[in-house]
Image: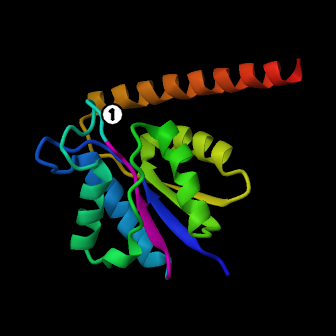
Amino acid sequence: MNKTAIIVLGSPNDAQGNLSTIAIERCQRGLAEYRRTPGARIIPTGGWGEHFNTTVQPHGYYTGKYLESHGVPAGDILECVESANTVEDARLCRPLVERHGITDLIVVTSDFHVLRASFLFEREFPKTGLTFCGATTHLPADELARLKRHEEGALARLRQASERSSLDDRH
């Protein structure tokens, strides 16, 4: 039997726990995937970090509450993965995915973030069915361009590190 989980990757919230526009866009896309995928469970990600959450609750807590307030039963939301970045999102999801016997993942993030998220999740879950969904980002053009440049640089660094590691493994 196929067991699917929808991973909603974290994004900033403010000091009161209110989700950012990007976080809400990801939640909305997660809700759409949830409604399209009967029996799916949702894994919210995000712990703490100066750049995205400085409250006492992990970011994933706020994501979970948002999803519940939009009709997802609490029982369909698995525990939050308390990650600080996308690398940790992928790595720290593994034990939860294994514990729940999940065979397929739908990874929800922002459109500008899909390539890096797919690189990391494909590396971490080579034998798991993976689908990637990018929520449309509604930000001013200059801010979106800045985020895209950041993603391109981060992905390039990950690929270089991976290539170096592959070369080291051969020697």
Q: Residue 108, position in %: x, y? A: 45, 55
Does 46 appear in magenta? yes
Total numbered badges shown on the rendered structure: 1
Height in image: 74 above or below 156? below
Placement of the N terminus among the 4 image quadrants = bottom right
Report the span colored magenta.
39-47
Q: Is residue 26 magenta?
A: no
Circle 1: element type: helix
Q: Amino acid at mark 1?
A: Leu
Residue for badge 1: 144
Q: Residue at x 21, y 45 (%)?
A: 13
Q: Residue at x 36, y 69 (%)?
A: 31
Q: Nearer the viewer, residue 102 or 6?
A: 102
Determine the image quadrant of residue 170. top right
Q: How is the image coloured?
A: rainbow
Residue at figure coordinates x 49%, y 82% from the top left:
38
Q: Look at the picture and state if 67 lies above or below 93.
A: below
